[in-house]
Amino acid sequence: MSTGSLMEHYFLNPMTKLAKQRHLMAIRDGMVSTIPLTIVGSLFLIFLNLPFTDAFKEGKAFFQFLAANSLGIALPFRVTTGLIAIYATYNMGYSLAKSYELDGRSGGTLSLMAYFMTTMPQIADGLGFVIPLGRLGGASLFTGIFTSILSVEIFRLFVKKNLVIKMPEGVPDSVSKSFSALFPAFAIMIVMFTLITIAKVDLQAMFIKIFDPLKNIVDTPYGAVIIVFLVTLLWTMGIHGVSIVGAVARPIWTEMISENSSAYEAGAAIPYLTPEPFFQWFVWIGGSGGTLSLVFLLLFARSRYLKDLGKVTLIPALFNINEPVIFGLPIMLNPFFFVPFILGPVIVTIVSYIAIASGMVNIPVLVAPWTFPAPLGAFFATGLDIRAAILALVNIVILGVVYLPFMKMYDKKMYQEELDAAKE
């Protein structure tokens, strides 16, 4: 069996199947659905931490307004990032139920019901039962994953065994679907009641204890490099690397950036250096593989095809959309670009980690829209740190240097083929 056949059999095929695994896809969809909310929350949070000295703020009406209304200004952050587990849990349950061709809204609702059982409401004087916000945010995401999968699988089992209430014809579809979830809802509640009330299992504390060490592994230079290596390696094999790695890492990243944002709001020390914005703005510049630099180089190619490709892909690349260059060059399954596509991002990961860990650049604390050009996104995500924008520009240069010799070799090959084709 050839090397290519071995790679396809033992690596490509299993990874392709993993990318389509329904539970991982549901987790990915649930996490991605929260991105607009975290961006909106970050926009408001940054007003509370504008990078000006106290002397500059003194006596200015705008900053006095911010100080007097800090709780209200922070409210959008608290109801978005602060409640991130609620939104993610519903959408994971919805997505997983739809993948089984079940009612998505019932799947999401049942998942939320199970999740809220894990929050363990407390009695507060004058308020009655209250749920601590700490049990609704990023720290609870793994509990949300568990309850969404558990709830939808129980729901599916009841439907498969036909243990559901079927309403007569003529009953509105929404009503019929609601009653079909009645028996599954009762079963899910019994399971959660047994775990929480009778067995007294604190699921949220249990999952935090299990997965906290993962954050400490991810938040190291070794963990960051491994993530970058896996993502780029999968892309070179023709597999969407972020879909695979992100499905596993994104709950951890989301919890990390949520805790960073909370610390940023409180003016406390920022706990994690490598949440997802670290990779988005300092590594994936132009998209996975840091291909914006490569697109710039294509503009100066001798090959007519490569030059035209550079012109076509430049605007998308500026906004971190690189599928046109990945599939158009192509990068995947192209031995000319295996090394720079992996090596370049690994190098800038190490450079960025050192720059941030040494205090030269602020740690990412906010979520910026992923379509921002890299320097602007880095500036915003680090709390308006201009040094972050400079680091992004430096990384673009580094990536360009790595891509340059390989780009030249490929350009020479393509140019010669065009000359040969013209002679024929």
Image: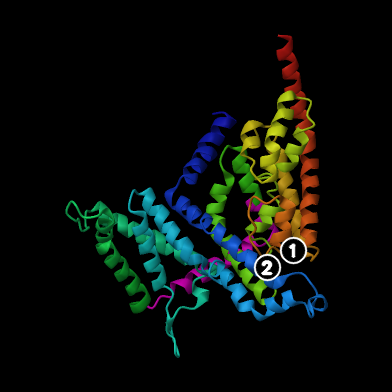
Q: Which residues are magenta?
A: 200-227
Q: Are marks 2 and 1 in contact (CB under 8 Å)?
A: yes
Q: Which dot marks residue 46?
A: 2
Going by the image, does 237 lie left or right of 189? right
Q: Amino acid at mark 2?
A: Ile
Going by the image, does 409 lie left or right of 230? right
Q: Is residue 379 above or below residue 11?
A: below
Residue 208 picture location, percent across and down: 52, 70
Q: Is residue 336 above or below residue 232?
A: above
CA gap, disc 2 and disc 1: 8 Å
Q: Residue furthest right?
A: 55
Helix, strand or loop at label 2? It is: helix
Examine the residues drawn in magenta and state their main secondary structure: helix
Q: Which dot marks residue 153?
A: none
Give me the residue at 68% from left, 57% from top. 278
Q: Tell me the quarter of the image containing the N terminus.
A: top right
Give me the residue at 51% from left, 56% from top. 33
Towards the viewer: 185 or 1: 185
Q: Is residue 76 magenta?
A: no
Q: Amino acid at mark 1?
A: Leu
The residue beneath circle 1 is: 384
Residue 399 visible somewhere in the drawing: yes
